Amino acid sequence: MVIKFKDVKLKISKNENNRFWKPIGQFWNITQIKINDEWYNCTLRFIKKNNKYYIQFRHPMKVEKRTNLVKEIICEGLYKEVETSIFKYNLVQYLENTHSINSISYDIRKSIFDRRRMMLIFSLALIPSLLFYFINANYDNVIIHLIAENTWVQTFFFFLTISGFISIFHPFSIRKEIGKDDIKEIAKETMEEEKRNEDIKRSATF
């Protein structure tokens, strides 16, 4: 996206490391300023003083996309400062992925992803319960009558009640236990994931 500020053009491109789903971190998007008809990577600084809003364009440089090597530097430090509206001030921060809204969004998405198993289990309990209610409410308690008249169904629910009561004092599970090979595989995948994350962080940082 390209945003104009008087005589300055700012382009903000998505950082591929910023995933909406399965987030691995919150990274800055790529900001570039147009100088002599060429785009240069730059950093931004947001300043508010005397109820006025300013954006500073700093460290414009030409960066090799694949290797992140710096090919050309226009200047060190401040290159240009522009006054802007409060709307653009907040919009640029949002597009750069540094606004407080971005942090809130990331925390919510990360929390949902980390708790996806719990939410799935909760949904498995909630959806059948809602179906049970609506079917009984609209079809003259047909399921309740079925349970009341069927010994096998009553026995099944009795078993679930007793096993649930026992699990309070002695938790049990039918899941397969983790063996040595599983532990080695998990450790290997974890080390590879950490190495990949470090490579991503290095490539996403000037």
Image: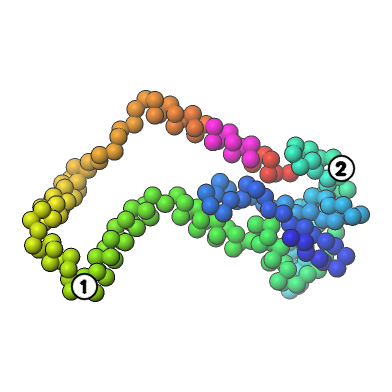
Q: Residue 84: within the magenta?
A: no
Q: CA distance from mark 2 to mark 1?
A: 75 Å
Mark 1, residue position: 139
Instruction: Where is residue 40? Give x, y as percent.
Output: 83, 50
Mark 1 is on which residue type? Tyr
Q: Is residue 204 left or right of residue 56?
A: left
Task: Classify mark 2: helix, strand or loop.
Answer: strand
- Quarter of the rendering containing residue 146: bottom left
- For the residues labelled 2 and 1, say whether their Cβ atoms are less than 8 Å apart: no
* Numbered circles on residues, count: 2
Is 172 above or below relative to 3?
above
Q: Is residue 78 visible?
A: no
Q: Is residue 132 left or right of residue 40?
A: left
Q: Residue at x 29, y 38 (%)?
A: 175
Q: Residue at x 46, y 55 (%)?
A: 112
- The extreme right residue here reads 36
Q: Residue at x 59, y 36 (%)?
A: 196
- Quarter of the rendering containing residue 103: bottom right
Is 57 above or below relative to 175?
below
Q: Which residues are magenta?
A: 192-200
From the viewer's perspective, is the residue at label 2 or at label 1 nearer?
1
Is 72 above or below relative to 78?
above
Q: Residue at x 76, y 42 (%)?
A: 65
Instruction: Where is residue 137? Give x, y as percent.
Output: 23, 74
